[in-house]
Every structure is written in C-alpha cells, then in structure tokens.
C-alpha cells in the first residue's frame, strides 16, 4: 500500500520525523545532544556514535553493538518478540492478499516498526514492565483486529494453536507484572520516597547531588545536581566523551552541600572525589526493583557531623526494612 500511494507515504514519514527533528534542533541549540539524553546515556551510546561518527570503522562498531543489543533484548523480552513476529505475519499476509484494509495494514506496520525500535533503543530486561506496557497494549489492539478476520493472522485450522501460543507467552508476563506491582511501588517509596522526605524536612532548599533524581526532583524544592547526567549538561557531555570521573563530579558539585548516590554506579565509590566524606548508608533488606538496595550519603560542603545528626534524627521514620549505618563518630 505504501508503493501505491507514495505521496501519502512521504507525508506520513515527514509528519513522524518532524517532532524528532524539532526536538533535536532545540536540544543542540541549548548545548545538548540531538537525541534525548536518556537514549544517549542510559544504554544507547552506540546509537549516538553511529549517528555522530565521522568514520566507517566507528559506524561499523556502533552497528555491531546495536545489533547485539537488539538480539539480546529480543531473547529476554520473549512476549514482545512473539507479538512482533505476529505483526510481521499480519503485514505479509495483508500485502500478499492485496486487500483493502488500510487501517489494519498501517497499524500493523507502524506497531511492528515501533516494537523493533523499542527493542533496539528502550527495552529494559528484568522487572521493568512499565517500559514495555504501552507496546503490549498497542500490539494487542492490532491482534484483535486481525483475529476478527479469519485467515489473516493464521489459517483457520491453526487458530486454536495460535491462541494457545499467545496465552503461553503472555501469561508469565501478566502474572509477573501483577506480582511485581505492589512490591515495586513499596520499594520505591521506602528508598527514594524516604530520601525525598528526609531532604524536604532537613534540607528543603539545599543543593543536593543525586544519581537518581526522579522522586526527589518531583516532590521537593531542593536544587538537584544530576550526577548521572540525564539533566546535567556538563556531566552528560563528559560521559559521552569518556572523561567522566572525580574531577567532573567535583566541578559539578562546587556549590553542593551533600550527595546521595549508589556506590555501585561509581566503581563502589572509587570514582567519587576523594574530598567527599562518607557519612552514612541506608540499605534496604527486601529490595526488588530499586537499582541498588544501598544509598550512600556523602558530605561535600556540609559539615559531616551535622548531616549525620540529621540522618540519625530521621532514622525513626525509615521503613523497618531499611538498615541505617553511620560511618562517622
């Protein structure tokens, strides 16, 4: 259908890429990457290097890494991969029949492409179901349309077999995501929620360094220095350039009172500035979804004793599952 209506296809492609190009132009003008920082820093530096690379060896290396990522995610996210294979079957079947089903044709093709891009750019293996929920919903909407047309999805005789296969692939995901929902929300509240409450109570207007900024930046008025770089331009470019280290963090936190980080993200603390004083740790004993069960508190331009006292006073408000350890007298 794309070949039969080239003008429509061109307009569709232009309308799809225009928001991305506009976003990229605004980002570059502001000193950021053309791509969203989440794509560049979290797991797709290979994609950024592919787009920005000026030599063939760099492009081939980036393509190899992207293909490896795609295949690894396709194996782990088997329910999504199964649904994408189904969409491919629908697209090929409709194209072969030359049937006039423009909505089903286009929706199957669009969701198929979106799903492949998701596996390449955004899929997160494990219990991070929220990253993939939209895709599962879109895929199922297309499947409902196809199932209503016998023979489009699978031959009539194989419909029951397909239904059993679909149930087999989706049931573990449905059960797993349902079981994970409550404990995941509880984990986040007991770790990041507690941190936000501590900052709101004792340091409401302070400048604080964090490597996981979501809950604190959303629920407090503190000034945040994003030590991971998603919202901090100088750190983001340092990570992309491969110069990220203690010196970068020292410069970024020159006016910061204290930092709260996952030591595991910084070489178990070895990549943090030597001038930072480790004051305390919170360790969650029943962690399921948080990136690291242990939060470490470092005094930067705040008195270590004062920070320690504030943490000690707040300890009674921590979850019973959180163990506080103090590292200064």
Image: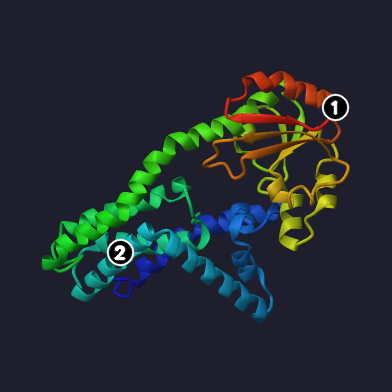
The quadrant of the image that shows the N terminus is bottom left
Residue 68, how many percent across, how many down?
53, 70
Write the residue at 58% across / 35% down: 285
User: Is residue 181 among the parts visible in the rendering?
Assistant: yes
Q: Is residue 279 left or right of residue 101?
A: right
Disc 1: which residue: 329
Quarter where residue 325 is shown: top right
Q: Contact (CB < 8 A) between labels 2 and 1? A: no
Q: CA distance from mark 2 to mark 1?
A: 62 Å
Please identify, in this view, whether the residue under mark 2 or under mark 1 is nearer the observer: 1
Q: Is residue 134 left or right of residue 91?
A: right
Disc 2: which residue: 87
Residue 128 is labelled as none
Q: Is residue 229 above or below residue 280?
A: below
Total tally of numbered discs in the picture: 2
Circle 2: element type: helix
User: Is residue 137 among the parts visible in the rendering?
Assistant: no
The quadrant of the image that shows the C terminus is top right
Q: Residues within 10 Å of mark 1 (few under 14, many from 20)?
A: few
Front residue of 317 and 159: 317
Q: Is residue 51 above or below residue 35?
A: below
| Residue lying farthest to the left in this orientation | 157
Point out the tag, 2 or 1, that comes first from the N-terminus: 2
Colour scheme in use: rainbow
Write the residue at 74% across / 53% down: 267
Q: Residues within 10 Å of mark 2 (few under 14, many from 20)?
A: many
Circle 1: element type: loop
Q: Is residue 233 above or below residue 73?
A: above
Residue 141, how many percent across, how many down?
28, 52
Front residue of 143 and 201: 201
Residue 216, how many percent across, how many down?
64, 32
């Amino acid at each position: 259908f794309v070949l039969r209506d080239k003008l429509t296809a061109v307009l569709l492609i232009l309308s799809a890429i225009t928001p991305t190009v506009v976003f990229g132009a605004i980002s570059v003008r502001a000193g950021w990457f053309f791509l969203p920082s989440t794509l560049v820093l979290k797991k797709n530096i290979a994609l950024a290097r592919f787009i920005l690379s000026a030599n063939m060896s760099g492009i081939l290396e980036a393509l190899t890494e992207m293909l490896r990522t795609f295949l690894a995610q396709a194996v782990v996210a088997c329910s999504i991969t199964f649904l994408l294979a189904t969409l491919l079957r629908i697209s090929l079947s409709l194209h072969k029949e030359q049937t006039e089903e423009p909505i089903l044709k286009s929706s199957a093709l669009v969701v198929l492409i979106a799903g492949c891009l998701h596996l390449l750019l955004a899929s997160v293996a494990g219990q991070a179901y929220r990253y993939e929920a939209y895709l599962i919903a879109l895929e199922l909407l297309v499947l409902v349309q196809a199932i209503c047309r016998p023979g489009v999805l699978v031959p009539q005789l194989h419909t029951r077999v397909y239904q059993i296969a679909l149930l087999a692939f989706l049931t573990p995901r449905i059960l797993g995501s349902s079981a994970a929902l409550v404990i995941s929300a509880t984990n986040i509240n007991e770790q990041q929620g507690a941190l936000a409450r501590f900052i709101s109570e004792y340091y409401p207007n302070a400048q604080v360094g964090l490597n996981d900024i979501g809950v604190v930046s959303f629920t407090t008025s503190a000034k945040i220095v994003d030590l991971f770089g998603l919202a901090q331009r100088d750190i983001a470019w340092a990570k992309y350039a491969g110069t990220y280290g203690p010196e970068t963090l020292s410069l970024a936190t020159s006016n910061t009172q204290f930092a709260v980080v996952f030591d595991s993200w910084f070489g178990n603390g070895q990549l943090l500035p030597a001038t930072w004083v480790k004051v305390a740790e919170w360790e969650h004993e029943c962690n399921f979804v948080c990136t690291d069960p242990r939060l470490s508190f470092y005094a930067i331009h705040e008195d270590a004793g004062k920070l320690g006292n504030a943490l000690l006073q707040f300890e009674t408000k921590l979850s019973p599952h959180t163990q506080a350890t103090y590292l200064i007298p």
